[in-house]
């Protein structure tokens, strides 16, 4: 029987029961069927509750109106509701979420694109555009369209009646005409959005999204209490099959895992208004993504829909591997330049290149390219299209902006996870020598002699073996330039003697330079090394039986009695970016060298300043394209148990990508 007084306090995000011991809540009904329910109550101050120090499941909350913490029974019912509630307008392949038994192959992340135009007519045109993609051969029709109504012009946003009318029109265009579920998002400027108007008006307009029939409405965690109070009177506005996304954004950094869980995810999951959690954070390092993935792992155990989004280039893999990680949705822009948040890839790339909502599953094996910088790399286009051509369905190749190699390879959520499903990597500037150390003694003999690794392949025992595919590809590109009889699309030039007796000037002393220098040595060429660090140049020259000269001598064309046949740049000078107009060997120096061939390992742009000026001097040029494709073709074989790559197709992919196609 009840023996204690229960005092209920109503407070911002939930109703707190303040008691020092167990209390009994009972019904006032005198029916004999009534039963007294004993509920454990946590002794806690308001401060402790707000800090997230206690889990919502340990607290007793009474519900009032539309907000409050959900009981365990309510959370179980909600999970059943989510599993059964695939929107009727969703595409058939994405209609079901992950099964309750944790199945890995049923779950597909929902590809979402944002409409950010300033007028209703422009928004409708964009909706029709993305809906029409299903009429062609492409797979880029989104599963969800987000209506970012805060991007509408001020004259609409400042008039509540016009705003509600605009929302109704846009929702109808998505849900009824295009048959695509939509999210109504009216983001305020204090949460990174465009709206700076009256808050109460904004929240009433959000409720209009549900009234108009939107499958989803997005409300910020910081506004969820105000949103509840703004609910229109007169019945349930939110109907069956409609879901509230509760979102939280961090635009400076990614918080600690404890903060992500207790201050964001658990607060959203514990609020009975919210159906889906969405957490977006700016990532300052690729390892930040590991914490976001931990949130998804927790949500998966809870069977609670959750989306995480790593903003900035550092967080890109959270989007590209969204299905593998288990994110409820991810965002892609309609086209490049129309991003609604930092770090968004295009919808087309997510769908057709990374196959987020088709071939990608939770069991997908991860391939990638590690480097810094990495945005200029064409490896993801090259390898993913090669995987598609070869009908390899269980792998996905992603760009990895890695600042600290040793820290990344020790990340137990990503690279070093227990599933061993991060299986193969291309390694580029500046990590090739670090990759060699990482492999220890498990290195291909040629790579060990060269002293640099550009390829890591996971072995059956979980370890990684290092290879160097640069040297064969670089030498092949130079031999093709020296010997016109070698076909341009030849994958290998193993038997060529074109370099025998020639003198090759290697510019640089890093991993690519070591590969090229040793490759030239293997082909019986003479090697001359020039590098900013004379000590490194001397060391490489000594290792491959060559000579060294200073970069100052190269710049002045002071080659002494050396007769140079091939100039080979392996530095990043001339690469797209701030140093695109720089060159390691000026035009006058090229003339004085007497060289007949000039090779540049840089392939973006295809014609660097060095190659352009070499061509003007009458040299035959070899771009980094052939080296890049050649080393990638060999990597493809290593990543796929010896399966041959389509060399000609890979070359065409890079050419098209370099042209912006």
Image (tube, rainbow, N blue to C red):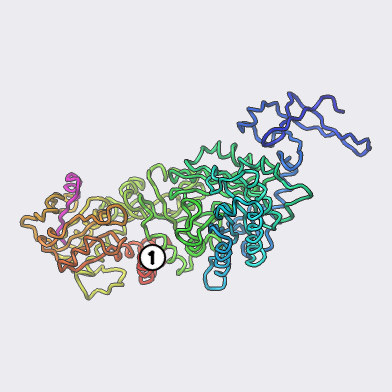
Q: Is residue 319 left or right of residue 27?
A: left
Q: Position of residue 366 (x, y in %)?
A: 47, 55
Q: Is residue 301 left or right of residue 494?
A: right
The residue lying at 64 percent from left, 65 percent from top is 179
Q: Is residue 498 above or below residue 171?
A: below
Q: Is residue 354 above or below residue 651?
A: above
Task: Say which residue label 1 marks.
Answer: 660
Q: Is residue 320 above or below residue 407?
A: below
Q: Which residues are magenta?
A: 524-540
Q: Residues within 10 Å of mark 1 (few under 14, many from 20)?
A: few
Residue 160 visible within the image: yes
Total marks in image = 1
The quadrant holding residue 239 is bottom right
Q: Position of residue 180 (x, y in %)?
A: 63, 63
**Residue 457 versus residue 118: which sits nearer the camera?**
118
The residue lying at 50 percent from left, 65 percent from top is 352
**Residue 506 versus residue 236: which sits nearer the camera?**
236
Looking at the image, the residue that sits furthest to the bottom is 485
Looking at the image, the residue that sits furthest to the left is 561
Q: Position of residue 395 (x, y in %)?
A: 48, 60
**Residue 52 versus residue 206: which sits nearer the camera?**
206
Give the position of the C terminus as an image quadrant.
bottom left
User: Is 572 covered by the magenta stretch?
Assistant: no
Q: Position of residue 178 (x, y in %)?
A: 62, 66
The residue lying at 32 percent from left, 51 percent from top is 429
Q: Is residue 163 left or right of residue 449?
A: right
Give the position of the N terminus as an image quadrant.
top right
Q: Is residue 419 left or right of residue 386?
A: right
Circle 1: element type: loop
Residue 326 visible within the image: no
């Amino acid at each position: 029987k009840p023996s204690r007084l229960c005092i209920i306090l109503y407070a911002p995000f939930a109703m707190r029961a303040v008691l020092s011991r167990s209390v009994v809540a009972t019904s006032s009904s005198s029916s004999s069927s009534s039963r007294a329910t004993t509920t454990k109550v946590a002794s806690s101050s308001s401060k402790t509750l707000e800090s997230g120090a206690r889990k919502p499941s340990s607290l007793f909350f009474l519900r009032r109106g539309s907000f409050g913490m959900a009981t365990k029974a309510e959370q179980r019912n909600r999970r059943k509701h989510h599993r059964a509630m695939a929107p009727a307008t969703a595409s058939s392949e994405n209609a079901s979420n992950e099964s309750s038994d944790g199945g890995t192959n049923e779950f597909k992340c929902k590809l979402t694109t944002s409409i950010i135009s300033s007028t209703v007519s422009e928004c409708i045109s964009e909706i029709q555009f993305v809906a029409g993609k299903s009429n062609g051969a492409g797979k880029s029709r989104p599963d969800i369209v987000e209506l970012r109504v805060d991007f509408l012009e001020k004259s609409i946003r400042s008039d509540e009646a016009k705003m509600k009318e605009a929302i109704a029109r846009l929702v109808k265009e998505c849900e009824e005409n295009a048959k695509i579920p939509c999210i109504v998002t009216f983001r305020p400027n204090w949460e990174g959005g465009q709206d700076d108007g009256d808050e109460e008006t904004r929240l009433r307009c959000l409720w209009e999204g549900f009234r108009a029939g939107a499958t989803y409405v997005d409300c910020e965690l910081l506004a969820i209490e105000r949103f509840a109070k703004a609910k229109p009177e007169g019945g349930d506005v939110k109907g069956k099959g409609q879901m509230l996304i509760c979102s939280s954004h961090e635009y400076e950094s990614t918080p600690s895992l404890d903060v992500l869980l207790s201050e964001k995810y658990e607060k959203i999951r514990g609020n009975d208004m919210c159906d889906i959690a969405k957490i977006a954070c700016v990532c300052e390092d690729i390892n930040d993504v590991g914490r976001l993935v931990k949130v998804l792992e927790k949500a998966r155990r809870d069977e609670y829909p959750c989306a995480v989004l790593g903003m900035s280039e550092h967080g890109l893999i959270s989007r590209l591997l969204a299905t593998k990680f288990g994110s409820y949705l991810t965002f892609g822009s309609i086209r490049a330049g129309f991003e609604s948040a930092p770090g968004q890839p295009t919808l087309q790339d997510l769908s057709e290149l990374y196959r987020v909502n088709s071939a990608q599953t939770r069991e997908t094996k991860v391939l990638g390219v590690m480097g810094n910088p990495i945005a200029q790399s064409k490896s993801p286009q090259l390898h993913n299209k090669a995987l598609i051509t070869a009908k390899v369905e269980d792998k996905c190749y992603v760009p990895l902006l890695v600042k600290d190699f040793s820290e990344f390879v020790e990340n137990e959520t990503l690279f070093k996870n227990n599933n061993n499903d991060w299986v193969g990597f291309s390694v580029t500037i500046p990590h090739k020598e670090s990759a060699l150390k990482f492999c220890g003694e498990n290195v291909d003999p040629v790579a060990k002699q060269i002293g640099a690794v550009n390829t890591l392949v996971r072995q059956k025992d979980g370890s990684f073996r290092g290879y160097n595919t640069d040297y064969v590809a670089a030498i092949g590109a130079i031999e093709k330039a020296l010997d016109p009889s070698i076909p341009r699309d030849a994958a290998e030039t193993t038997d060529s003697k074109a370099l025998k007796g020639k003198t090759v000037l290697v510019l640089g002393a890093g991993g690519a330079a070591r590969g090229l220098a040793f490759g030239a040595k293997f082909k019986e060429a003479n090697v001359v090394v020039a590098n900013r660090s004379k000590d490194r140049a001397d060391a490489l020259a000594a290792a491959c039986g060559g000579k060294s000269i200073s970069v100052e001598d190269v710049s002045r064309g002071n080659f002494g009695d050396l007769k140079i046949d091939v100039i080979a740049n392996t530095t990043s000078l001339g690469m797209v970016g701030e140093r695109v107009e720089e060159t390691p060997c000026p035009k006058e120096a090229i003339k004085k060298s007497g060289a007949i061939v000039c090779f540049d390992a840089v392939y973006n742009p295809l014609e660097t300043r060095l190659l352009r000026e070499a061509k003007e001097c009458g040299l035959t040029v070899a771009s980094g394209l052939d080296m890049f494709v050649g080393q990638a073709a060999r990597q493809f074989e290593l990543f796929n148990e010896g399966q041959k790559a389509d060399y000609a197709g890979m070359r065409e992919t890079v050419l098209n990508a370099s042209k912006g196609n």
